Image: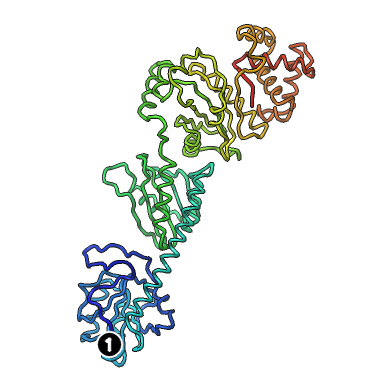
Amino acid sequence: MDEPSMPIPAAGPVQPPASSPPGPPTPPIPLAELLASKDLGLRRIAGPAEAELLWVHTSEMADPYPYLLGGELLLSAGVLLTDPDHYVGRLVEAGAAALGFGVRPVHETVPGALIEACDRQGLPLLEVPPETPFTAIARAVWRLMAEARHRELRRVTRAQQALATAAARPDPVPAVLHQLATQLGGRAVLLTARGEEVHAAGRRLPPEAARALTRLARVVARERPGAPSSATDTHGDTHLSAYALGGGDGLVLALAAGRRESGDHTVAGIAVVLLSLLAAPHQGADAAGRSAALVRMLLGAAPAEVAPLLGSTGPWTVIHARRTDGTPADGLTAGALGASLGTALVDAGRGGGEAVRLLLPLPGAGAEGAAAGGAARPLPEAEADRITPQPGWTLGASAPTPVTALDAADSLAARALAHAQATRAPLTVDAPVSGLAALVPPEQAAAHARALLAPLTAPLADTLRCWLSLHGSWDRTAVALGVHRNTVRQRIGRCGELLDVDLDDMDVRAELWFALRQGRGGHGGHR
């Protein structure tokens, strides 16, 4: 029988002995898979049925302990076997996974004392028939490991594709966690450094296991120097692991699964990278500049003074957004929307159905944009294309506006969002005045609008504007304003009475629309 003088790893280069040996290059092989190879004729005659093989090693030394890395299937013909109990004890101490004993020419049968020692000390013992060379066993293990490695790579590739697809969804963080929990068959939780749950997916854990997972997450939370980037533990039959996310926010990905399979760590690593990118602050504008702008505004500075600290002097576009399915948007989801639109200036709202608000600086806008005199300029086609529909979101955007008129632009973006929701459009942009209306001097147009609309209160004017923009649709206006359709009818009827006009007359509607676009903070229509 062949007897290599050094350990034979199951795949890859020969691994020299070391006090802290590296992990195996391929997934471990269950002992049952090797025994299922009928052409080898192997038979388990002692010890437990379950074991995982990491290496194959042949040795005829009386004590092979110094040459074992742990996890080996040790093959021997028992040339120097004199004390089976001591021999098995040393193998168990070295971490050997199993012992394969070849019969003939040294021993006609496996010694009974060796069988008893393996049963007593819990080491699987295989009988190797005379016609099976040790090299055939090694080749079989290498083949099984190559197949396992191929299965692992296919699984990791599928998981990577699924996680990347989830990261492209409108709600990327919950979607990635859900896909990760599905891939691992367990629970995936995103926690703050204090152990507060941000998002979670997968089956819920028993209270004790959940507390153990939270404790493990605190180990890797980067609130103190020297914290590890990952940690693992077990709670009963549940395997726990925690990974610190990049970005310096102290977020931790915590995982719990009933089983631990080859490739789980790689799949989790892919999710860590994606979640770190999704949870990290967008880097389009300098964070220090944003902080300085906030401080200066709190201390009384005008918006025009702090705008340059935000990376642009204007013009700016205000965007209001709501999830199309009506679910509220958390900070991470709103931040992902901002990253898709190219801005870090995001207000996720305060809940209660409040829209997400974003400030989008126009590319290449600098001091020239600020010097435009405060009037919103037309929206060029290239800039209009920058604001594109986002899957899973309904958006309303203002026309480009100087920083001194952002409050009015905020109202216009809110109206545009209401219009988009009423018409079920993914995006509505409040376009500036153009065409024939632009030929009338702004001062004269504004004076005419004030005189014509003077009898109307602000709520009535807003209702009339919305009703006209939706071509007189009672139902869509009700949806846009969030009121009952009968309320819309009453308000429009009141407008007709106060203005003393017939609102079914197209000339009247056109004149009122012209006036409403000029007055009460509205500069344009919707497109």
Q: How many labels does the image show?
A: 1
* Quadrant of the drawing holding the C terminus: top right
Note whether residue 27 is visible.
Answer: yes
| Rendered position, 255 above or below 292 | below
x, y percent for residue 319: 54, 28
The figure's colour scheme reads: rainbow
* Quadrant of the drawing holding the N terminus: bottom left
Judged left or right of residue 505, residue 134 is: left
Judged left or right of residue 254, residue 400 is: right
Circle 1 — which element?
A: helix
| Rendered position, 11 above or below 328 | below
Q: Residue at x 43, y 61 (%)?
A: 153
Q: Residues within 10 Å of mark 1 (few under 14, many from 20)?
A: few
Who is closer to the viewer here, 250 or 364?
Answer: 364
x, y percent for residue 62: 20, 81
Q: In the figure, residue 309 lies in which quadrant?
A: top left
x, y percent for residue 443: 60, 7
x, y percent for residue 451: 67, 7
What amino acid type should be assigned to the residue bearing mark 1?
Ala
Who is closer to the viewer here, 185 or 23?
Answer: 23
| Rendered position, 133 above or below 386 | below
Q: Residue at x 28, y 62 (%)?
A: 22
What residue is disc 1 on? 113
Judged left or right of residue 411, residue 132 is: left
Note whether residue 127 is visible.
Answer: no
Q: In the figure, residue 290 lies in which quadrant?
A: top left
